[in-house]
Amino acid sequence: MEYNCPLVNMEIDETVCYDIQMVTGNMINKRILQDYGFDVDDSLITKERSDRLCSVCPFNQLMQTAHVVGKTATA
């Protein structure tokens, strides 16, 4: 599935979205984004922008996982 990502201002799929979240969360090296044609020194993909935009995005897989884990842990 592809959708418009306000962080990078283009259509991306869930794999790219996930990797962007992993990079901005300091879980993987940002150089992985070169595989998708992104400039790793670009100021679009920053922790600050990700925190603001991705935290409210319905396609953010890491946020979806956090909600599921949180519900499971308290159930």
Image: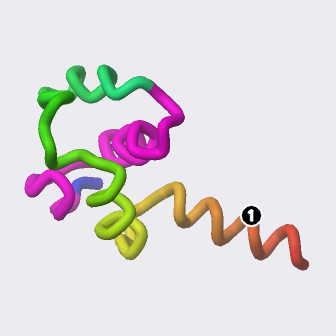
Which is nearer the eye, 2 or 71? 71
> The N terminus lies in which quarter of the figure?
bottom left
Residue 48 position by quadrant: bottom left
As drawn, 9 above or below 42? below
Q: Which residue is mark 1?
A: 69
Instruction: Classify 10 Å Cα crowding around label 1: few (below 14), some (14-19), many (20 and above).
Output: few
- Residue 17 lies in the magenta-colored region: yes
Coloring scheme used: rainbow
Q: Position of residue 33 (x, y in %)?
A: 26, 29
Q: Is residue 40 left or right of residue 9?
A: right
Taking the spot 17% from the left edge, 64% from the top edge, the residue there is 6
Magenta extent: 3-28
Which quarter of the rendering shows the C terminus? bottom right
Relative vertical location of residue 16 with respect to residue 33 in this rendering, above or below: below
Q: Quadrant of residue 9?
A: bottom left
Magenta segment includes 51:
no
Q: Nearer the viewer, residue 25 or 38?
A: 25
Question: What residue is at 9 percent from the left and 53 percent from the top?
Answer: 10
Q: Is residue 52 left or right of residue 29?
A: left
In the image, residue 31 lies at what x, y percent? 30, 21
Residue type of the residue flagged with mark 1: Val
Q: Which residue is located at x 23 percent, y 54 percent? A: 2
Residue extending farthest right = 75
- Counting labels gives 1
Instruction: Identify the residue at horizontal 35%, vertical 71% (top origin).
Output: 57
Position of 2 with respect to 52 (left or right) is left
Q: Which one is nearer the viewer's eye here, 29 or 59?
A: 29
- Residue 32 % position (x, y): 33, 23
Tell me the SS state at disc 1. helix
Q: Residue 9, relative to residue 39: is it above or below?
A: below
